Every structure is written in structure tokens, then in C-alpha cells.
Image (cartoon, rainbow, N blue to C red):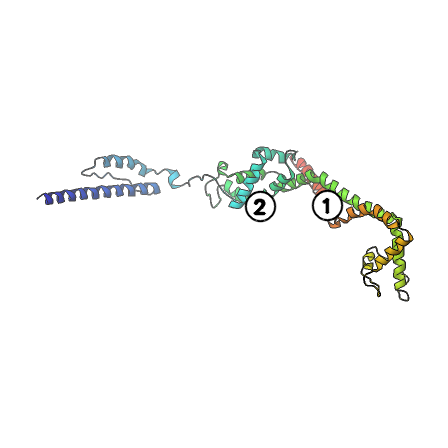
Amino acid sequence: GDKDKDKNEDEVIRQELKEELREKMAELDRLFALLSGDAPTLKATPTKSHSNTHDASDKLHPLSSTPPPHLSHLPHPPISVRLVDTNRSLHISVVLSGLHRDLKTLRSSLLHLDASTLEVDQLKALLKAAPSAAEQSDLASYLCGTHPSYLGICDPSYLGLPEKFFLEVCDVPCFDQRLSTLIFTKGFAPLATRAKDLSAAISFAAGAIVENDELRVLLLHALAAGNRLNEGTTRGAARGFKVAGLLKLGDIRAAADKRVSLLQWILKKLHEADPELLRRMTKELGPRVKAAAAIQLPTVAAMVEELRLGMGLMQQQESALVQLCRDVG
């Protein structure tokens, strides 16, 4: 008898739990329907054991008639709008954080071509961070609320730091050219000084070589030796030769003694005629020629070309600013 009684009580409890679970699931279905905005008007369903279901359904009933528009029509605002890829966004954020200034101040400095507090490396980093045409187009579509990833959203306050940087500088006239001009202006003096010093070192060495009497004697002896070796040929009456030809004299060996080159033989004869000649030549030409020999002419030419292009860019910016002032005023 006790076992049957316990069994009946368990069955009653099980049925009550099933009924309660069924009611909860029905409430969840109604809530999901409300959130989707297409639920019909709710009807209160009385139950035997839970009178509070009436209160819940009465509270849910008015929500079904006019669903909140922010739940059914507009997207949830994002925490931060990202219009550029992760790597570029990180790079731009690092560059901007290294400037230690707000975007408004940075924009004002660039508008007035004032880079007094910015280093050349910082300006070059800003130039790399400048928005491309595609990035400017994405920003414009977002501000119009038509960006495919953020339809209906156009609040500038949602923009991330790189995107806010784009927003500040997009309307700066000739932004890239301004940065290039500032970079050239900041680096002009040291670059011009360096190019001038290198050119002066080369000119100084060249002048010393042309005016050195000892070197002239060496060249005359080399010319005479060459004519003697080429006697009877079309090259046997040469009146001069290129200075670079001196290097070839070191490759010409005597038939009797392969250890002695023609250049060594000439230097030996000069030393016998004047023991101090080679010492004087080395003393006068050594430091100057050694300094000039370490300079690469293509390097100097590249510096001069950079200065020339920079001056051309400055002239273009000047013309653009004059035209802008005319258009505004």
C-alpha cells in the first residue's frame, strides 16, 4: 500500500513539472515572436496551478501591438566601426599614439604646414598612414549610412582611431603632397649640407691630382715606358693615356722575372732618380684621394636629384596654395 501511494505521488509531481515546463516553453516562444516583431496579439491562457501566468501575459500583451523599432528595423550600433584591415589599423594606431597629440591639433598643424614639433620619421610614418582613395570612399559611404557592413549607421563617434584620423585629414587639401613637402623642408638643410660636403671632397681631390707635379712625372715615365714597349706599332707614339691605365701596368710582367710588374719597375726608376719624389706625392695626395675614393658618385647624384625633385614639389605646393587662396577669396 505504501509503495503504491509513493508511486502515485511521484506521478503527480512528474505531471506538474511537465505542465510547468510546457508553460515556460510557451512563454519563451511568445518572447521570441515579440522580439522578431511579427507576433500576433497575445491572449491570456489561464492555468490551474499558476495564477501569475495571467500577470505575465498581461504585461507581454501591449508589446505585441507596436514592436519597438530599434528591435525590428535598425541594427544594433557597433562598439567600434572598422573600415580598414587589422594589420593596417594596428600600424596607424601605433603611429598616432607615438605623436602624443590629439587629431584636431594634428590636422591644424598640417593645414598650416607647421611641422616644428614633428620629426622627419614621424612625418614619413604619417605619409604611409594617409588614407587611400578606396579608404576615403569607404568612409564616405559609412557617413552616408550606406556602407555594406554598417547599413543604417553613420555616427562618427562609432569610428575607430584610424577611421577618425581619416575623417580629420580627408578634407585637408593635397594631404599627401603637404606631408611630402614638410618632409623635404625638414630634411633639406642636412641633405644639402651632406651633398655639398661630398662634392667638395671630390673636387678637392681632383684639383690636387691635376696640380701635383710628382704625379705628372710618374705619368710621363709610364707614357715613355708604354711607347717603348709598343715601338713599331700604331700605339708606339701615344701622347697620353687615361689615369685608369696605371692599374693595367701592375698586370704587365717582365719576361725574365715574373715577380716584377711594369709599374714596380717604373717606381723603382723614379726612386733611383729622386728618393723623395714618391714620399712627397703620397703625403700630398694620400689623405685627399683616400677620402674621395670612399665616396660613391651615384650616391651624390641621387642626393642632388632628391634636392631637385623636392624643390619642384615646393614650387607645385606654392602654386597650389596661391590658387586655393584665389578660389576662397
The residue shown at (66%, 37%) is: 324
Q: The C terminus is located in which quarter?
A: top right
Query: Residue 265: percent from the left, percent from the top?
Result: 86, 58
Give the residue type at disc 2: Ala
Q: Secondary structure at mark 2?
A: helix
Query: Residue 192: percent from the left, percent from the top?
Result: 74, 41
The front one of 110 and 189 is 189
Q: Is residue 256 above or below residue 60?
A: below
Give the residue type at disc 1: Met
The label shown at residue 133 is 2
Question: Real-space Cα distance between discs 2 and 1?
Answer: 31 Å
The image quadrant that residue 234 belongs to is bottom right
Query: Residue 33: percent from the left, percent from the top?
Result: 32, 43
Q: The N terminus is located in which quarter?
A: top left
The residue shown at (81%, 57%) is: 247
| First-in-chain label (2 vs 1) | 2
From the viewer's perspective, is 83 left or right of 47? Answer: right
Q: Is residue 292 above or below residue 161?
A: below
The label shown at residue 303 is 1
